[in-house]
Image (tube, rainbow, N blue to C red):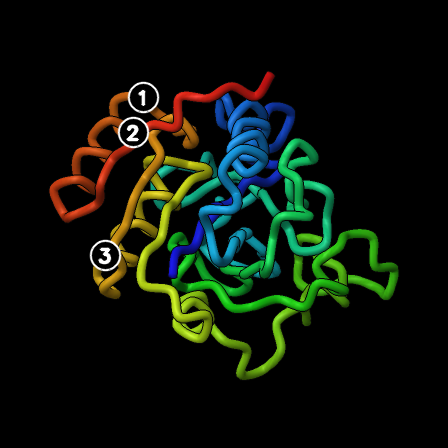
Amino acid sequence: MRALVIVDVQNDFCEGGSLAVEGGADTAARITAFLDERGSEFDAVAATRDWHVDPGPHFAAEDAEPDYTESWPVHCVAGTEGAELHPALDSEYLDAQFLKGRFDSSYSGFDAQLGSPDMVRSGAPEGTAGPFGATAAAATAVEDGAPGLDDWLRQQGVNSVAVVGIATDHCVKATVLDAIDAGYDTVVYTDLVAGVDAERSDEALQLMEENGAVLQTWGGSAE
């Protein structure tokens, strides 16, 4: 059984977002086109999302500059527009969404837990939670004991994953390395990812390959 794991294709990581990655919006559109063409090859499709409520030092202090390695601008606050999936990614393809980083600096999709679809949507009016304006409902979008990505994939009988998304040199890299460590046959579509830094992204792809990932290209177009 094979699954597609779509990493963090969210508004704040695409053009116009608070932590925009060049090519993010195009990557979202290309992933949808890929699913239009080849979605039937996958038995399950899962998306991960940054879903921050109060992630501690993951967000740079108000009076400090982020170092873009361990500390970052405020982004993907739970329940806000920035945390939404980019509209160019067709969410109708998704079987499940996994939320990470509510109270820590999680990067890997394998640190995420299954979220409630009804609470994943932004705009819940029931007050706020945490210091960054996360909506109260969104802050509870993960129920106690919710399965993690690995648990859910195994429940589906998955033994092979393909990984796409944002950002190549951060959350995609972490997700791929954890997938390999968990024993999944792992493919990365190199034309369906976008990275923060071109050189570090190339190094990340090389590291993934050295650890056992198979690098492939789709070769299709979003047009």
Report, in whole angstroms, how far the alpha carbon at label 2 lies from the one at label 1. 5 Å
| Amino acid type for the residue under numbered disc 3 | Ile
Residue placed farthest to the front in the image? 40
Residue on which disc 3 sits = 180
Count of numbered badges drawn on the protein: 3
Determine whether the residue tagged by mark 3 lies in a helix, strand or loop: helix
Across and down, in percent, residue 57 comes to: 45, 54
As drawn, the residue found furthest toward the left would be 210
- Kindly report the distance in space between the C-alpha atoms of the residues bearing marks 1 and 3: 23 Å
The residue identified by callout 2 is 201
Q: Is residue 18 above or below residue 54?
A: above
Q: Quadrant of residue 141?
A: bottom right
Q: Residue at x 66, y 58 (%)?
A: 131
Q: Tell me which numbered mark, 3 or 2, is placed earlier along the sequence.
A: 3
First in sequence: mark 1 or mark 3?
3
Quarter of the image containing the N terminus?
bottom left
**Residue type at mark 1?**
Ala
What residue is shown at x 31% (from left), y 21% (from top)? 198
- The residue beneath circle 1 is 198
Specify few, some or many for label 1: CA neighbours under 10 Å numbering under 14, 14-19, or 20 or more.
Answer: few
Q: Of the residues tagged 3 and 2, which is closer to the observer? A: 3
Alpha-carbon span between mark 3 and mark 2: 18 Å
Residue 17 appears at what percent x and percent y? 62, 31
Residue type of the residue flagged with mark 2: Ser
**Of helix, strand and loop, which one carries label 2?**
helix
Is 107 situated above or below 88? below
